């Protein structure tokens, strides 16, 4: 290879190196943007996993609470409830299996062993509840229910739901994970205590205080849920006509329930324990319906967000490819221009050298 060819090769290699460096530098920003988009999509997809598993856990929670209430009333002296207790035990086992399948499918970090421990505790409690005193059985079931409430919060934590950054979905998440479950538990405790009082037809000062505190807590929980929903409405007005009618129905049932609780607290035992139990159950079912509706809209908003983010990500990819293609074309044009100029210069140098040789030879 003569000196001229070596020089041309060296020149081309330098141009290729410069082009490679420019392409890598130009790709850095779009690549980081693409990675950020993918991470955001993955974040929201994990939120959807958590939101999908929550209804199964709440179904288990509500039915465990119902079993606790029926067992408490049975132990208070209403022997006619034994069949209902046995039937509810079967329902809880079915809900437990459904929750287990949902947890396994979700496969959220740290949730499966936590659920396994809770499941064992619930089974053991159910096995001995009818052989224990009313107070002991109620306490054991309450411990299990507290574990179920903690599991709901843990799922929200491990699925990124509690870290949601969009305000409409954040406020929906907050009522679904933190407000509704607490309201359901308070209403369930009122149901159980009131039903037991009506069955035994006895109420003391401590029970009256407990009923007053619990109903105040129920009103506070519902008010906190309403405040959270109002905040969600302020950032996404389309939610209000969907959710608000259900909330209004809940408000009506809570007012009706309040009158029943007041009667029990004042020593008026004219209400049938079964009717009181059903009135409280209506409130619980209303809150559960509100929770399911909020959760459904949360899922819809998350899916819409993911679709938008995927469009934005794909746009980044297309724009990045177009940008790189433009750079390649520009480089090719620059290379072609510079290379031709170099050839012209080298040809001129050769011509000059030949002329000088001819002059010297003369």
Image: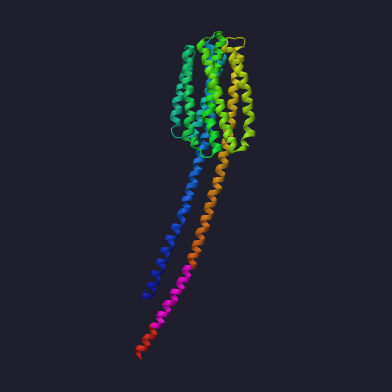
* Quadrant in which the N terminus appears: bottom left
**Residue 119, percent from left and from top:** 47, 24
Q: Is residue 192 above or below residue 292?
A: above
Note whether residue 12 is visible: yes
Note whether residue 98 is visible: no
The residue nearer to you, when weighing 234 against 290, is: 234
* Quadrant in which the C terminus appears: bottom left
Q: Is residue 234 above or below residue 208?
A: below
- Check the image and name the residue furthest to the bottom: 362
Examine the structure image and report whether residue 348 is included in the region drawn in magenta. yes
Quadrant in which residue 232 is drawn? top right
Q: Which residues are magenta?
A: 334-352
Q: Is residue 156 above or below residue 70?
A: below
The residue nearer to you, when weighing 144 against 201, is: 201
**Residue 37, percent from left and from top:** 50, 47
Examine the structure image and report whether residue 308 is included in the region drawn in magenta. no
The residue nearer to you, when weighing 183 against 124, is: 183
Question: Residue at the location (48% across, 50% down)?
Answer: 33
**Residue 276, percent from left and from top:** 60, 15
Q: Could you tell me how many numbered marks the image carries?
A: 0
Quadrant in which residue 272 is drawn? top right
- The chosen color scheme is rainbow
Question: Looking at the magenta stretch, what is its main secondary structure?
Answer: helix
Quadrant in which residue 28 is drawn? bottom left
Question: Residue at the location (56% across, 30% down)?
Answer: 227
**Residue 113, percent from left and from top:** 43, 29
Question: Residue at the location (62% across, 20% down)?
Answer: 255
Question: Residue at the location (46% across, 14% down)?
Answer: 136
């Amino acid at each position: 290879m003569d000196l001229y060819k070596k020089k041309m090769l060296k020149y081309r290699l330098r141009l290729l190196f410069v082009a490679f460096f420019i392409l890598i530098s130009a790709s850095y920003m779009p690549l980081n943007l693409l990675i950020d988009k993918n991470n955001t999509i993955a974040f929201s997809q994990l939120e959807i996993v958590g939101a999908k598993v929550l209804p199964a856990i709440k179904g288990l929670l509500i039915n465990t609470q119902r079993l606790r209430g029926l067992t408490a009333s049975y132990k208070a002296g209403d022997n006619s409830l034994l069949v209902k207790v046995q039937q509810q035990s079967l329902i809880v086992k079915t809900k437990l299996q459904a929750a287990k399948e949902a947890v396994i499918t979700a496969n959220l970090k740290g949730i499966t062993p936590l659920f396994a421990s809770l499941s064992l505790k619930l089974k053991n409690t159910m096995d001995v509840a009818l052989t224990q005193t009313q107070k002991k059985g109620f306490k054991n079931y309450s411990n299990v229910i507290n574990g179920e409430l903690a599991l709901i919060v843990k799922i929200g934590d491990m699925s990124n739901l509690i870290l949601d950054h969009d305000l409409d979905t954040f406020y929906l998440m907050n009522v679904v994970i933190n407000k509704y479950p607490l309201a359901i538990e308070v209403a369930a405790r009122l149901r159980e205590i009131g039903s037991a009082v009506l069955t035994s037809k006895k109420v003391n000062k401590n029970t009256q205080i407990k009923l007053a505190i619990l109903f105040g807590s129920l009103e506070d929980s519902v008010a906190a849920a309403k405040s959270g929903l109002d905040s969600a409405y302020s950032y996404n007005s389309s939610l209000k006509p969907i959710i608000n009618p259900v909330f209004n129905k809940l408000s009506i049932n809570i007012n009706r329930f309040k009158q029943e609780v007041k009667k029990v607290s004042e020593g008026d035992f004219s209400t049938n324990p079964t009717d009181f139990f059903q009135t409280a159950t209506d409130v619980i079912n209303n809150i559960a319906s509100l929770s399911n509706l909020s959760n459904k809209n949360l899922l819809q908003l998350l899916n819409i967000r993911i679709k938008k983010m995927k469009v934005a990500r794909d746009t980044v990819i297309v724009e990045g490819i177009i940008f790189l293609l433009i750079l390649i074309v520009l480089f090719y044009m620059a290379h072609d221009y510079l290379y031709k100029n170099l050839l012209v210069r080298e040809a001129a140098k050769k011509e000059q050298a030949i002329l000088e040789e001819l002059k010297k030879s003369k």
